[in-house]
Image (spheres, rainbow, N blue to C red):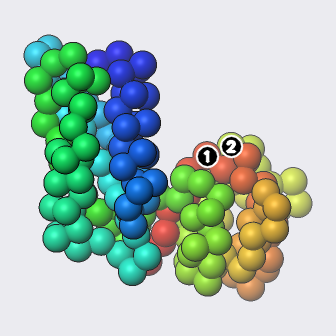
Amino acid sequence: MEKASLEKVTSFIKTICSTSEFDLVDIENSNTSNSAKFVIFIDKDGGITLDDCVNFNQLINEAGGLDDLIDSSYTLEVSSPGPKRPLKVLSDYVRFKGRKVKIKLLSPDVLSSKKVFVGTVEDVIGDKISINDSGKIFDIKFGNILKANLNL
């Protein structure tokens, strides 16, 4: 599948999320020579149940038009992001304030030279996330985050 088609599918799913209680966390896409597979990860306040996944799949079907965006046969799965859910947007850190996270940086922290932090989200101010890692507070710029997820 072309990148442009994946972007159209993502836009389509975001539109459905904007009119529902669900948040789009991520879309994974894999392709074979004659078909595509999409795994749509959704979340909402309070977490996701199997019924939520079924209901979101029904919302996609009711909206119609997805077939027009995908130029091959496809499989669609709707799933919870799981307990180690990725943190993709700044608002995720606000939502999970007080929770333990693991953050990998693009470039090392200037003060500590660390590239990986495991700690609790203390605060989010502007584009900086304050993390309590082993009793020390570190301010991490959102733009310097390579990957982050909740950590059990």
Indicate the secondary structure of the residue bearing disc 2.
loop
Q: How many marks?
A: 2
Identify the amino acid type marked 2.
Leu
Q: First in sequence, mark 1 or 2: give its number.
A: 2
Location of the C terminus by quadrant is bottom left
Give the number of the disc on residue 76. none
Q: Is residue 111 left or right of residue 105?
A: right
Q: Could you classify mark 2 by the number of other residues whose Cα lies within 10 Å: few (under 14), some (14-19), or many (20 or more)?
A: few
Residue ID at (73%, 58%)? 114
Residue ID at (72%, 53%)? 142
Q: Is residue 25 visible?
A: no
Q: Nearer the viewer, residue 12 or 34?
A: 12
Q: Position of residue 22 (x, y in %)?
A: 38, 62
Instruction: Tell me how far mark 1 sits from mark 2, CA to CA.
Output: 5 Å
Indicate the secondary structure of the residue bearing disc 1.
strand
Q: Position of residue 99 (x, y in %)?
A: 56, 80
Residue for badge 2: 106
Q: Position of residue 104 (x, y in %)?
A: 61, 54
Q: Nearer the viewer, residue 50 or 130?
A: 50
Q: Position of residue 58 (x, y in %)?
A: 17, 54
Residue ID at (79%, 57%)? 127
Marks 1,2: beta carbons within 8 A = yes
In the displayed structure, 119 sits above or below 145; it is: below
Location of the N terminus by quadrant is top left
Q: Is residue 38 left or right of residue 133?
A: left
Residue for badge 1: 146
Residue ID at (61%, 83%)? 98
